[in-house]
Image: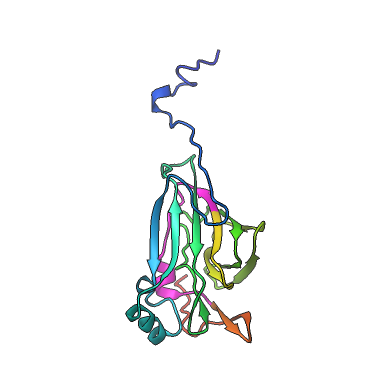
Amino acid sequence: MFDLESCGGQKMENLMQPIRTPVDFKKGIVAPDRVIERKAGDMEGMYQDELTLKKLVSQGNPLMYQVRQVDIPEEMGHIAYSTTIISPGKVGNEYFMTKGHSHAKENTAEIYFCLAGEGYLLMQTRKGIVSTTHMKPGILGYIPPYWAHRTINSGNKEFVFLTLFPADAGHNYEVIQRCGFAKVMLEEGGRAVLRDNPKYVPPDG
């Protein structure tokens, strides 16, 4: 017989209680949350035009993006979720974007769901195979296991999306910091265009 007090062997007092999270679909605000901000000065080495990036830093160091995380235990069995808000703007002709990462547990997937604005989800395997998904409100992007990923705001408004992933997946920024992505997204003639990244260094293995 199932015992509610012991919950099938686990004491009820050790269980996380269910939570309710309001989400502002236009602004990407979730409550309660923990905010992580990335300004121009935090993006050294990520852009083609380093001189223009340094100029932006000296002229006010604008906010490029923020992540609003809900407090979920980083343990197997839990699903973490957060929102990301990328500001509109460019460094030279390269759009504002996130740093990008792979998962510490590479065999874990992730879901991005666009709430407002538009942009691109850029994904890449260790062998440099690249895939992109154009994100706009109502579009869900699925990132399979073993794909590194970053997001790019190609519009003139904030690009806002919700993320869901295994809470114990972890984040690995080091490979992207060291190697970059094989492709970059630039504005050319008023359009977002994918080009080869001359700074890309294939990772070992």
Q: Residue at x 42, y 61 (%)?
A: 172
Q: Quadrant of residue 26?
A: bottom right
Task: Give the x, y percent position of residue 37.
Answer: 39, 62
Taking the image as drawn, is residue 147 in sight? no
The answer, for residue 185, to whether it is visible in the render is yes
**Residue 94 % position (x, y):** 51, 80
Query: Which quarter of the rendered picture does the N terminus lie within?
Result: top right
- State whether residue 69 is above or below residue 91: above
- Residue that appears at 39% across and 66% down: 38
**Which image quadrant is residue 125 in?**
bottom right
Q: Is residue 178 magenta-colored?
A: yes
Q: Nearer the viewer, residue 197 or 125?
A: 197
Residue furthest to the top: 1
For image coordinates 46% across by 45% down, the residue present is 31
Which portion, as a residue range, is magenta? 163-182
Question: With 147 as the anchor, is 33 left or right in this view?
Answer: left
